[in-house]
Amino acid sequence: MAKKRQQAKWDEDLIMNKGAPGRRAHIPEQIDVPKAEIPRDWQRAEPADLPEVSELELVRHVVRLSQMNHGVDVGPYPLGSCTMKYNPKINERIARFDAFAMMHPDTPDIAQQGNIEVLYRLQEVLKQITGFAGVTVQPAAGAQGEYVGMLIAKAYHEDQGNKKRTKVIIPDSAHGTNPASAAMAGYKVVELPSTENGYVDLDALEAALDDTVAAFMITNPNTLGIFEPHVKEISKLVHEAGALMYLDGANFNGVVGMVKSIDMGFDIQHFNLHKTFSGPHGGGGPGCGPVGVSDQLVDYLPAPLAAYDAEKDHYYFDTDRPKSIGRVHGYHGNFGIAIRALAHIYRNGGPGLRKMCEAAVLNANYLMEKVKQIRGYAVPNAKGVPRKHEFIASPVPLMKDTGITAGDVAKALLDYGIHSPTVYFPMIVKEALLIEPTEGETRDDLDHIIEALKEIAKDAYENADTIHSMPEYTAKGRLDEYELAKNPVLSQRQTKQTQS
Amino acid sequence: MSTYYESYIGTSEQERQEMLKDIGKSDIMELFADIPEDLILDNPLDIPGPYSEQDLHRLFAKIAAKSKNSTELVSFLGGGIRQMYIPAAIEELMRRGELYTSYTPYQPEISQGMLQILYEYQSMLAEILAMDVVNASMYDWASALGEAILVMSRLTRQNKVIIAGPVAPNRIAVARSYAESSGQELVLIPGDDGKLPIEKLIQLFKEEIGKSRKDRQYAGIYFEVPSYYGTLPDYPEELINIVHEANGLVTVGVDPISLGVISPPGTYDADFVVGEGQLLGNAPSSGGPLLGILASKYDPKWVRQIPGRLVGATTEIDSKLPGYCITLQTREQHIRREKATSNICTNESITAVNAAIYMAALGKQGYVELSQSLADRAQYLATQLDTIDGITAPVYGPVYAEFVVDFGNIDHEHLEEICIAAGYVPGVRIEGMGCQRLLAVTDLHSKSDLDGFITLIKEVVA
């Protein structure tokens, strides 16, 4: 029997419903200066209806809530395409150094040399890892990196006097952010169907390529965890058509240190430092989505870039970038994640990055081979081809035999203290469970995932009803998401307004 | 060769060999046999490392030492973000690995902690802004503004948006990027006395009302309270009524801390609010992660048009007990793809968590006290600086916690050097305006910090 894990189940009311009038947590310091008068028209009539709680009350509230939350620090998190790897604690400590955490980005350069150096070093090392000629760390997340990449493509083509290139080709297996980012940058999206094996369909690509195409945007390894074997031929076709090759770096953990993006023929790539290079995901963010580009595109990178004057041994922000696409962030992007990533890259070094990639790929393939053997699960597409950092298990047979779906399996896994894989993505695979164990999981944890999947399948065949009632060991059972979407309740104020 | 990186790999070398064998492979490179051979690097990357944990600490401590330790500087930097005091309880709570090592709470049953806190963030900030709906975070104020402009355009099907009064150049730059790549046009109407040019705007929108619907062109207007120069405009109620009459929408940018004592946008009928949530107890982090605030009135149609994640309150199916989950996901990129309301996926959740704890820690009374204490400090500092010959403070008024100071004939660089050497950062340069600088006060400033700076400036001018 695979072990189940009981998550904490506190009956914890909203903080707004706690406390009592007059209770205090943080009391602002008052200093001995005269009281300022706020102009009469502007005086707030009623104080905001915030809770009144004691400090201990607040601390217990947050600690209890945290106990009702699953993180990488709690248990396996094989969420495909999200690279939920361990977030080394030394990186947390370094990011908290006062000079880094408490720095205002508009501090004059002379007082923040070290901080600019961090950004500069990260730009340099990302160049070395990919072979690109220029890198910006300004985009706050992968999607913003994609958006920047698309703006760069646009600026490049326009600079070439070419305004006809209005389309971006994207495979149907792509992350949803790809078409959304291309559309935000003003491009028309052309969806390219994949082959049965999940590869790019070269004939379809060739047919779609013409002088109206600005870029081809792909993820490699793709969202099925499969390396695109024809990547060089694809680059050649795309370049011959005058378009640019864009690499979505979300799956970089599957090849980092093993291949260089420039060698595959890419012109633009965004990184997800919060995935590949261990930035904590923070319950949804922050990320950090640097963009690397080939030689011909460096001029278009966002401004400013971190720069170094070797002669004066001086770091500065280079704002003199006349062809730049401009700004996408108020400051220099998510420095807090950038510094964690730089620390992680240095800690690993070249040999470590390679080992990290190997171990991530081994864990994924080990899981895949074991899952294949479990009754009810199939591993579709590209038979016999090793996967990179992630793979798809599809419980189509299980569903046909028992009615238990990928979604049910995902919910059942939660009872084993395992976060569910990514479900129903990519959309081109039926009943997809996209599984990415990362290099951080132990063999015991991998075996636990396998045992849990086995037991769920067994229960499905013997007594499917037990699966429908899962999860039971989590803080809450299944929630009424349907009613909420129909009548969304998004704040307590909104409910008060409706009542009054 | 050192193998310090093994700390982060879950399996031992021996286990890895066994696992390989177990799946019928003898060499790890067999798992990379699908990659064209000439693409595989012969050698590991030639980059710094591997480092021991100690050496990594030493290296970064050395790099950090090249920067001024910002806790030892008295900084008057603002303009969107500020270094505020972070209560110890919040700092400790933010180390909960269950929270900061989690992903977006797509599986609500196992992620109730994150979901409930985000719902509390939305709810408490909604009270402060007097708006109904706050999303679960955008990247920063600037991109929240960019997205708000796109929302106004979508809802009105018009493509011009006015940015009025003083707005930070970096926010305008980002807004421009978002707007222009989607075919929207920004019209800047800065105003000439450092304030929102309300009369001019009223006139402009009155003309709009006079036009037929198809000749109207403005999706709406954006302005800030307080403005980038720290100023409070004349009360904008009439302007907003007229914009609404012209079928336009209004987005207001705010400093959330100001709203302890200043009238919130909901009371003067703003449609959308953006702002910087870093101010809610988050570290400035050298410019990020920040916390983009995006709020709106509740309208069933509007909530389906706003970007970003939304957490809603619902019930457990079996027990009918309360529970929380992400909702209205059909607006988002992972479902709607190129037709999504935005491309945003990863956001800034953890800074929203921090903000939620901060708002609760201050509570009803503390929030007002903190807000007032910044107005007090700003008034004191401005008044005292203004008594110095050759210095004008504030250049524009009335102000809240930030204000423009004219330092007269001093050179920016010279002033910065002297101040930094003495332990002060004299605010942000206002480009192209002689030696005008934007100064901000925070709750880190003691009276002696303010007095020390005043004394220093007296010496510099003399």
Image: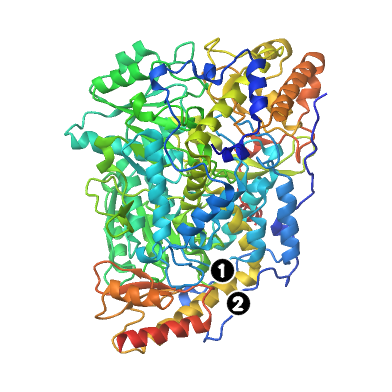
Say if mark 2 contacts mark 1, CB within 8 Å.
yes
Mark 2, Cα crowd under 10 Å, few <14 / some 14-19 / many 20+, is some
Q: Position of residue A73 (x, y in %)?
A: 67, 42
Secondary structure category for the residue under label 1: loop
Task: Identify residue type, mark 1.
Answer: Tyr
Circle 2 or circle 1, nearest the eye: 1
Q: Is residue A31 visible?
A: yes
Q: Position of residue B349 (x, y in %)?
A: 56, 48
- Up/down of A196 relative to A494, above or below: above
Q: Residue at x 50, y 71 (%)?
A: B262
Q: Residue at x 29, y 75 (%)?
A: B414
Q: Residue at x 70, y 54 (%)?
A: A62
Q: Position of residue A28 (x, y in %)?
A: 61, 74
Left or right of B84? Residue B159 is left
Read off the residue under disc 1.
B85
- Up/down of B366 relative to B157, above or below: below
Task: Identify residue type, mark 2.
Answer: Glu
Q: CA distance from mark 2 to mark 1?
A: 10 Å
| Residue B410 lies in quadrant | bottom left
Q: Residue at x 53, y 55 (%)?
A: B58
Q: Which mark is residue A29?
A: 2
- Up/down of A405 relative to B236, above or below: above
Judging depth in this view, the residue of A229 and B369 nearest the camera is A229
| Residue B366 lies in quadrant | bottom right
Q: In which chain is the residue bearing label 2? A: A
